[in-house]
Image: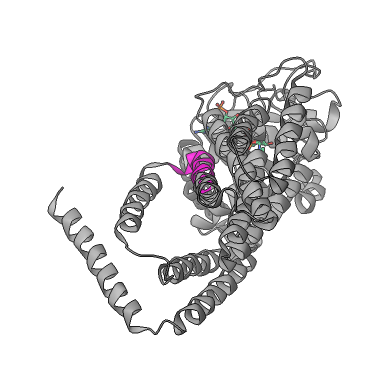
Amino acid sequence: MCGTDEAIFALILFSFRVFSVFRGQISFMQIPYLIEIIYLVASVLFIYGLKAMSHPTTARRGMNAAAVGMLMAIAGTLFHREIVSYEWIIVGLVIGSLIGAAMSIWMPMTAMPQRTALSHAFGALAATIVGIAEFYRYSGELGSFKMTAIGFEVLFGGITVTGSLIAFAKLQGLVRGTPVTYKGQNIVNISLFVAAVGIFVYLIFFPVGILFYVMVGMAFLFGVLLVLPIGAADMPVVMSLMNSYAGLASAATGFALNNKVLIIAGTLDGFSGLILSILMCRAMNRSITNVLFGAFGSAGTEATQIEGTMRETSVDDVAVQLAYARQVVFVPGYGMATAQAQHALRELADTLEKRGVSVKYAIHPVAGRMPGHMNVLLAEANVPYSLLYELEQVNPEMPTTDVAVVVGANDTVNPDARDNPKSAIAGMPIIEVDRATQVIVLKRGQGKGFSGIENPLFFKPNTAMLYGDAKDSLSKLAQAVQQA
Ligand code: NAP
């Protein structure tokens, strides 16, 4: 261990020593009140944080408020009289902090969905282990209320652990991203689920024996079988659902441990995850059942017969088109995120605005790989929020737009979703760039979108392809526009 690590470790030990002394100063009678007050403040901060996160301008403040709330919840918990020593808590804290720090430092922004999936798996694993420990400790003496709470905890927790790990593996390319399906799959899954619920109900009345562990095993298995048939393109919805399950598992843990802040935070997490899943499905014009059981991207879909050829263009030609346009709409997608092109995009937009061109950014609700992906990146590049237009606002403007510039987006601008009822993405609302006078598509080559289907937009007569890394192309365009 190097000197800095030793110093940090000593500081943590010292903090806990100070904390123990401080805890010893408070009378036994005052402790429960103190904990409840800390939990109350933490809960208010969580609720405020969620509210603030619903708008880009206040989102950062909301994150900070929620983080302070979490710190208070942890600190409050450390006051509990049941804690007899802090050694193992320190070990957990150090290991958890090291893993968290490593993930935040080394995982790139584009791997954020995988990172989130791993976090859900860890959170749910903690809830499941607490549930198993509580059952082991009180086995035979559990009342039906506590058994119900523990049952929910391990069922939601178990499903979330393995479901999130499969989601991680699919997003990371460790498991094939296309749906893994077989005949009778839904019947197998539903039978397994019904059997696990049956055992759960039995345990509420007879909370003893090996059946509890069988139920936990079934929950783990169900998590795997539930996520395997779902395609990688639907993983954000799955993860949001897993987030919801992890929250509900935490809320159940709160009931099992009689911990109010866990109940509040878990319920907030559970329902915000559920609402987010529903909103994402709505943005793709699909139902949750279709996402979970529809095996998106499998057999039964047909691609459009593509007509026309792809036309390549050059930086100089595009620069002239942009410089003399009246209105330009930029449509960012996943490619902008991978290229980290948001700053270069803003610089090009600034250059155009200085020339009197009206610039707008069209934001599709599921562009990128997680909700709000584009908003976060553009906010990081200081793009004014007033220039961001949602799909419903910007589509009516497309016929009067001179140039629509697609920056690494594909599925979210695929006209097949609107025109071909048999397309794998049929019904998903799109940004209708094909209705603009000219469309310029910035991408590296012939790569497909996340759904893996061809995009007829690229073959339309009003579309031209500017090949190359998005950041590189945008920087060259900004220079060329200045000289145009
Ligand atoms: P997309 O369909 O995944 O297409 C991204 C395009 O970016 C690719 O065609 C790729 O083509 C290009 N690209 C990649 N790296 C690039 C780089 N460095 N420079 C330039 N171009 C690059 O992206 P999208 O339009 O944003 O669509 C998002 C997809 O995720 C949709 O299918 C959506 O349903 C799904 N999804 C998202 C969410 C969410 O919450 N955001 C939720 C559920 C589902 P090349 O390889 O040729 O460069």
Is residue 194 toward the left or the right of residue 475 in the image?
right
Q: Is residue 471 magenta?
A: no
Vertical side of 257 occupied by 242: above or below: above
Q: Decide if residue 397 is in sight here.
A: yes
Q: Nearer the viewer, residue 456 or 28?
A: 28
Vertical side of 154 occupied by 21: above or below: below
Quadrant of res 438? top right
Q: Where residue 249 appears, x then y in whole percent?
A: 61, 50
Which residue reaches farthest front?
A: 140
Which residue reaches farthest left?
A: 3
Q: Nearer the viewer, residue 457 or 237?
A: 237
Q: Magenta residues, as a range?
A: 108-123
Is residue 85 toward the left or the right of residue 360 in the image?
left
Q: Where residue 234 appears, x then y in whole percent?
A: 67, 34
Q: Nearer the viewer, residue 356 or 190?
A: 190
Residue at screen point 53% across, 80% down: 37
Is residue 126 toward the left or the right of residue 106 in the image?
right
Residue at screen point 79% across, 36% down: 289
Q: Where residue 476 appears, x then y in whole percent?
A: 46, 39
Image quadrant, ligand 1? top right
Q: Is residue 110 magenta?
A: yes
Identify the image's colour scheme: rainbow, by chain, secondary structure or one colour: one colour
Vertical side of 80 occupied by 446: above or below: above
Secondary structure of the magenta portion, mostly?
helix
